[in-house]
Image (spheres, grey):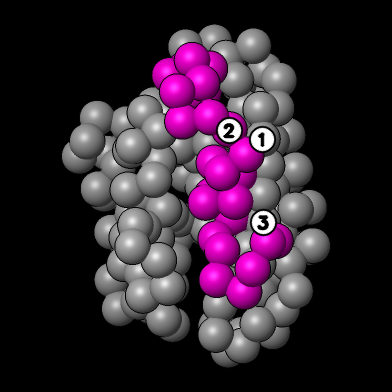
Amino acid sequence: MPHFDDHRWMRRAVDLAHRCPPATGAYSVGAVIVGADGEEIASGFSREVDDAVHAEESALAKIAPDDPRLATATIYSTLEPCSQRRSRPRTCTQLILAAKIPRVVIAWREPSLFVADCQGCELLAAAGLTVVELPELAEQARAVNAHLSI
């Protein structure tokens, strides 16, 4: 894998999270998918296209599922990908696994506000993906969610 500018791309994801319409029952999250060449492939944010869409889901919907760049891409998400979900048939963890993206970078682990024990990072790592956490950027991801009682 080439060297990634993880902080740069996570800051881009945080910027996208700021575009989310605040919702009392959902996090504001940004996601960016970056190819091995260091170029952005797609991006998304929570509630970008409807009230239930998650950031990772929105970004992945903008790419053909068989796009060969996904096999060497990294997805940056300001929040740990969901491992439980009521609003859609598949979780973001399942969508990332189906897309065969090998590397996931997050800024913030999902607190227990809506889901008692999110297992997104554990499930991705158990499936063989590289999961990187940037706790030094967690406060920026949390700040976008000041509308919630976290």
Q: Which residue is drawn at 54% across and 10% down?
A: 2
Q: Is residue 137 visible?
A: no
Residue holding disc 1: 42
How far separated are the C-alphas under marks 2 and 3? 15 Å
Contact (Cβ within 8 Å) of mark 1 with mark 2: yes
Secondary structure at badge 1 equals strand
Q: In which quarter of the image is residue 35?
A: top right
Q: In which quarter of the image is residue 51?
A: bottom right
Q: Which residue is drawn at 32% across and 48% down?
A: 94
Q: Residues within 10 Å of mark 3 (few under 14, many from 20)?
A: many
Q: Which label is found at residue 83?
A: none
Q: Which of marks 1 and 2 is in front?
A: 2
Q: Which of marks 2 and 3 is in front?
A: 2
Residue holding disc 3: 45
Q: How crowded is mark 1: few (under 14 residues within 10 Å), some or many (20 or more)?
A: some
Magenta span of residues: 48-74
First in sequence, mark 2 or 3: give its number.
Answer: 3
How far from the left and from the top, in percent, is residue 132?
A: 44, 38
How far separated are the C-alphas under marks 1 and 2? 7 Å
How far from the left and from the top, in percent, is residue 56?
A: 54, 49
Residue holding disc 2: 63
Identified by mark 3, the residue type is Phe
Point out the residue furthest to the left here: 126
Q: Residue at x 20, y 39 (%)?
A: 126
Q: Is residue 27 visible?
A: yes
